[in-house]
Image: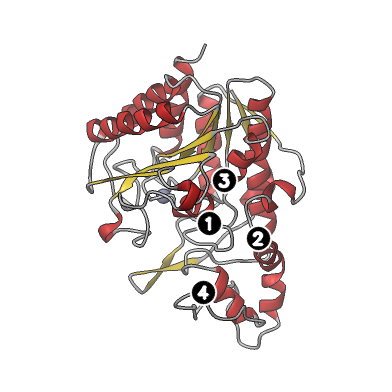
Amino acid sequence: MKAFYAEEQKRHDPKAFLSSGAAQPNPEKPERVERLLAGALSAGCTIERPRDHGLGPVAAVHTPEYLDFLEHIYARWQRIEGASAEVIPNVHPIARNGSYPASAVGQAGYHMADTACPISGETWQSALWSAWSAVDAAETVMSGVPAAYALCRPPGHHAFADVAGGFCFINNSAVAAQALRKQAARVAILDVDLHHGNGTQGIFYARPDVLTVSLHADPVRFYPFFWGHADERGEGPGLGYNFNLPLPRKSADSAFLEALEVAFQRIRVFSPDALVVALGLDAFGGDPFGGLSVTTPGFSRIGEAIAKLDLPTVIVQEGGYLCDELGDNLTAFLTGFGGKMR
Ligand SMILES: [Zn+2]
């Protein structure tokens, strides 16, 4: 399978984030890339550098003011006397019915959901190349190849059309789905990350052409808290085209695979022309987040099950944090998926 990745994606190196109010090392580390590359190579992938696709495919799912913010906020932040080294918000609108702020501090609060997505001088380029990896994977699949893997880092599924959050800046899975729409009338996104894909849900919430399905740890006491509940079903023309399957904490392989079957039923009825898998590997029991208890052989079975949908598939890397098995879990998924490929 072809895999896409550019070295620039490794330069973003966030230092800290707040967890229950306490400063902690940011777990979205550049070293993740090494583990994931090793995992993809073990699965037999060939690694290719994506092309520069410009802003078009990114602007197809994000607002112009947000992209302008992402590109320029770091330089603006440096001009504030006494400001932090990385852009981290400290004030947020309680609702977005006020005015768009002119100041860097105000815009950081407007465009950043939480403290887990610090922006440094490297963030914009890393996020752009990450999205371009997703675009190249989508173009590969549109050329008739059954599947491709995008080693997207930084990840994307917590990024809304104009809000960063949860280590995410540009929503790579949404970029891939929108790119696929050039050929595919209907696209399904299946998000198997430990955390609910709230940004992806938000981007497509009112649209019936992209079905969003997410399996994740129940957000009742877990990030992203405000989204990911079963009663969030879409709105307007998109009503019925968003499907959330929250799982009890510590659910293991059998419960995950059962929920996956329920997801497949919805996807089959939707009858998509292409699939995006938002592949978080943090549902692993040994992941630092420890929210679910999927095993390494479990990822292989998940890959095998998804391949049975027999759809042109773009696999987009989402979460999955440093632990000894991170690379093995990617190998397991890709091997399980590939074993069922024609
Ligand atoms: Zn996650």
Query: In this figure, which residue is indicated by the disc labeled 2?
Result: 63
Circle 3 sits in a helix, a strand or a loop, which is it?
helix
Query: In this figure, which residue is indicated by the disc labeled 3?
Result: 174
User: Where residue 58 sits in the image (x, y, percent)?
Assistant: 67, 50
Between 229 and 58, the residue placed more toward the observer is: 229
User: Where residue 269 sits in the image (x, y, percent)?
Assistant: 41, 28
Residue 9 showing in the rendered view: yes
- Which mark sits nearer the N-terminus, 4 or 2? 2
Q: Residues within 10 Å of mark 2 (few under 14, many from 20)?
A: some
Q: Quadrant of the N terminus?
A: top right
Q: Residue at x 43, y 45 (%)?
A: 320
Q: CA distance from mark 1 to mark 2?
A: 12 Å
- Which mark sits nearer the N-terminus, 4 or 1? 4
Relative to 288, is 279 above or below?
above
Q: Is residue 289 left or right of residue 184?
A: left
Relative to 260, is 341 above or below?
above
Query: In this figure, which residue is indicated by the disc labeled 1?
Result: 159
Numbered tag placed on residue 259 in the rendering: none
Q: CA distance from mark 3 to mark 2?
A: 13 Å
